[in-house]
Amino acid sequence: MKQLALVGCAHIHTPGFVKRLQARSDVQVKTVWDHQPARAEKWAAELGAATAADVDAIWADDQIEAVIICSETNRHEPLVLAAAAAGKHLFVEKPLGMGAADAYAMADAIDRAGVLFQTGYFQRGNPVHRFLKEQIEQGHFGRITRLRHSNCHSGSLGDWFTPEWLWMTDPAQAGVGAFGDLGTHSLDIMLWLLGEDVRQVTASVHVATGRYGDCDEYGEGLLEFGDGTVGSLAAGWVDVAHPVNLILSGTEGHAYVSNGQLYFKSSHVPGADGEQPWTDLPEPWPHAFELFLDAVVGKPDVPLVGAQEAAVRSAVMEALYQGASTHRWVAPSLR
């Protein structure tokens, strides 16, 4: 059985990860640490684990092979750098960094260490996204001209963050507001489908309820790719419905998702007339967190997100926010 540590318990996804850990028999959380001791004690009790007063004890423990970092985003860099230096495999909740500089520094350290890495971009495993990636790679859309992706919920309207997760509404700790929190998932899918050659971006982000002060609650972004493809990205915490989350248009194909159903049209694929829901889809992948645990216990060919990929998403999102604040197009810091 592989021994793990939970390093930081701040993220709103912590309870879900704990449930997944409890359901597995091939991994065990040995130690929990958080800069707020009471928070560490709470989740350690749920996991039957010990708490560490000093996080350095986790880095020094040779029995611990992997760590799960669910701290506030502004605490990621020192924790990730220390974990990589200690040779621990890493699951780091998204976004990886506050922006380009810290994200690339972490990605470089992870790559140098040669450890496994994963972050919480679970939407790659969605059968629709997997299918579209296959069709794009086979050229069934022709020249892609536009891709729109959105990720929205009613978190602000329902005040999902008070009191335990309020740090996520403070961009000084989270790096982003609603647009970046949910939009990073859409951004990941867009770059996964189209590639990372993003020439310039801009965005408009706003407050709707004011429940969380100046923290943005919704926004729209525009991305111009090197080949001329136009991407648009929407995300927010103030949506009472979200029926259409994807539209993909090309010179030889088209797809959209309505209420979870894919409509697909391409002259290259028999029966793809776009009139009826397309149901011939790949199987879903396990959740991104489960994929990380699978890789840690030695399962082969597990599809993980690369550390550099995660860093690029932080860099592009930073540029989107810069575009919103300056009302200009911004070239993201890409390598």
Image (tube, rainbow, N blue to C red):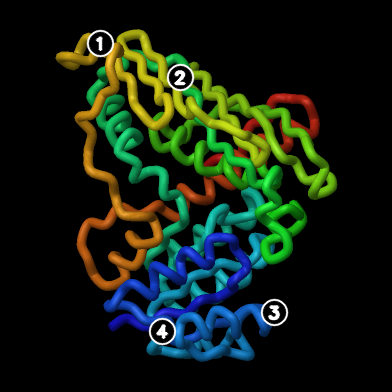
**Residue 197: percent from left, percent from top:** 48, 31
Disc 1 and disc 4 in contact, CB within 8 angstroms: no
For the residues bearing labels 1 and 2, Cβ distance under 8 angstroms:
no
Label 3 to label 4: alpha-carbon separation: 21 Å
Compare marks 2 and 4 and give the one earlier in the sequence: 4
User: Can you give x and y, in whole percent of width and height, for residue 269 in the image?
Assistant: 18, 16
Is residue 1 toward the left or the right of residue 58 in the image?
left
In the structure shown, which secondary structural element does the residue marked by tag 1 occupy? loop
Horizontally, residue 323 falls left or right of residue 241, namely right
Q: Which amino acid, mark 4?
A: Ile
Please state which of residues 160 and 137 is positioned toward the viewer in this rendering.
160
Q: Indicate the amino acid at tag 3.
A: Gln
Note whether residue 137 is visible.
yes
The disc at residue 227 is 2
**Residue drawn at 66 percent across, 67 percent down:** 75
Front tag of 2 and 4? 4
The residue carrying pointer 1 sits among few (fewer than 14), some (14 to 19) or many (20 or more) residues within 10 Å by Cα, namely some
Secondary element at tag 2: loop
Indicate the amino acid at tag 1.
Answer: Asp
Q: Is residue 203 above or below residue 209?
A: above
| Pointer 4 residue | 64
Q: Is residue 141 above or below residue 223?
A: above
According to the picture, the residue beneath numbered tag 3 turns out to be 36
* Quarter of the rendering containing residue 205: top right
Label 1 belongs to which residue? 273
Please say if the residues under marks 2 and 4 sit with CB atoms less than 8 Å apart: no
Q: Position of residue 313 (x, y in %)?
A: 54, 44
